[in-house]
Amino acid sequence: MPNKDTIVDVPTVNKIARLSRLDIPEVNKESLTNDLNNILGFVAQLDEVDTSNVEPLASVTGHKLPLRSDDVNDGNIEDLILKNAPESSSGFFVVPKVIE
Amino acid sequence: MSELLDLNLVEASKSLKNKEISSLELTKAYLKSISDTSSLGAYLEIVEDKAISMAKESDKKLIDGTARPLEGIPIGIKDMFCTKDIKTTASSKILENFIPTYESTVTQNLWNDGAVILGKLSCDEFAMGSSNETAAKGNVINPWLKNKKMSPGGSSGGSAAAVASRSALAATGTDTGGSIRQPAAFCGITGLKPTYGRCSRWGIVAFSSSLDQAGPLARTVSDAALMLNSMAGYDQKDSTSANLKMPDLMDYLDIGIKGKKIGIPKEYTQEGISEDIVKFYEKSIDWLRDEGAEIIPVSLPHTKYALPAYYIIAPAEASSNLARYDGVRYGARQEASSLDEMYELTRGTGFGDEVKRRIMIGTYVLSSGYYDAYYLKAQKVRRLIKEDFENVYKKVDYILTPSTPTTSFELGKKQDPLTMYLNDIFTVPASLAGLPGISLPVGLDKSGLPIGIQLIANSFDEPGLISTAKVLEMSAGFNFIADGAAR
């Protein structure tokens, strides 16, 4: 991990915001960059830990993902699925035009 | 009214079953409490009509002898649980109008056991916070000090404040890094985070899926045990749900701790911890020793790295989980001419600052070129933290620690995100290891604020956790009621 204080700059923050699909107003960018640097500087402490022979841990349960038979156990709930949609029409979710 | 509010959950349940009181009068007393304590801001939504009809239903069952374990008990639900036909916002603007068409497994389990819903409780937005100040509709006030506006803790701040102010007999919470235990400590009540996998996550708004766990906030250890009895259980709809039956926790309340070994980790008495908390921590050790436990100094050497590992793993998972809020299928949408612009405006406007920070951190640590250095590194450290606990549990049965480094703080005083994160320094390690932990009140500090002590058990040893906590509860004899509680 790079040095504290200079981990991310405003162009990097713009890039992360774009990847996150978050509109960040220009006036907030500097303070957000500061916050992110403080947090990333704090987590950089992990560099002190020797993890050379350690396997990453993704799940604490240790159990295997259970399988079930591939049966339909739900359905015919189109109305419920669309109920909270900001915009829907003829059983579809509606989004702004994608292809010009 | 007061006599009804004086009853804890176990006592109320007994009085209901003996027909000394009815669920309708109990529920009405709590609805009045909610209105008397409304300035605390604990409730986001009150469902009075539903509460009354459920209470009437319970009264029928109490009379005809078919009462279930929580029959007629009025409780509050953290707004992270989807409740069918009842608005569920996760305290976020992006979900301000979301009305689930289905019920979470945990809340369904509670209704199946006869509990009565009072309403939905405020929390930090998407459960991200330690003070309840990130809630879109504003902070909740801790009922303990009437002259100062103190934080109830977070993220289950509304749940803790409701139980402490006697505007719910018990409440549900969720805990990702301390979100049940820390607010319970701040509000002088008992909060239990079960082993990861004990309670189904199905229908709970997802924050960090490898850490999120539901649990109860209640007045006493017995009350928490009775709640968890109903909340827990295997659920096919959650692939990480443990297919393991939990014994009836009520059978473990009076077992005692003679001959049990309690580990005292040296890493939990670092600088920055308040003197009063150290004093009560030492008292708690003495109490357990007096009750026949053997006290053993232990070491969890990677404790210091739990918080930094957590603040990589939790935001990484959050950034992925919160990708679903895109203004298409549910939630608020901002209109725009292109799809991308719609996404960005919807999410930029709908999420609060702390949520945005965590999405940004999560996206960064998962992005190409940084994944190994941050995310994989944190997962490796997570294994070391889990192994620390495994090693210690070869020598001891339970671990005793303070729940928080300080008691509650004034609202609006902690502006820097990192300072806020330090609140969870004692609760995060058990979360990363998936272990069950309970915080219970043992005393008050100089300013009259409650002090919480945490017990951590090995995986799936909730029964032992309850036995030990009950002994500590009896020794501490904490019987204070918050200044701002309904009477």
Image: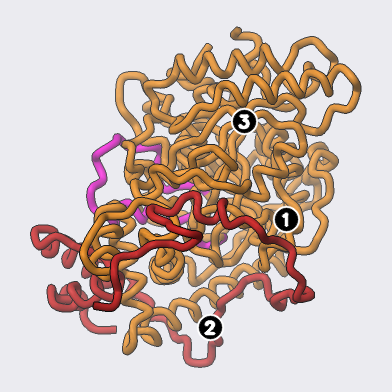
Per the model, the C-alpha gap separating discs 1 and 2 is 31 Å
Mark 3 / mark 1, whichever is N-terminal: 3
Helix or strand or loop: what does disc 2 sit on?
loop
> Quick one: which residue is furthest to the right in this view?
B65
Per the model, the C-alpha gap separating discs 3 and 1 is 40 Å
Per the model, the C-alpha gap separating discs 2 and 3 is 41 Å
Rendered colour, chain B:
orange
Q: Which residues are magenta?
A: B402-430
Rendered colour, chain A:
red
x, y percentage for residue B440? 58, 39
The image quadrant where one finds the N terminus of chain B is top right
Q: Are marks 2 and 3 in contact (CB under 8 Å)?
A: no
Disc 2 marks a residue whose amino acid type is Pro
> What residue is disc 2 on?
A56
Nearer to us in this view, B438 or B375: B375
Q: Chain of mark 2?
A: A
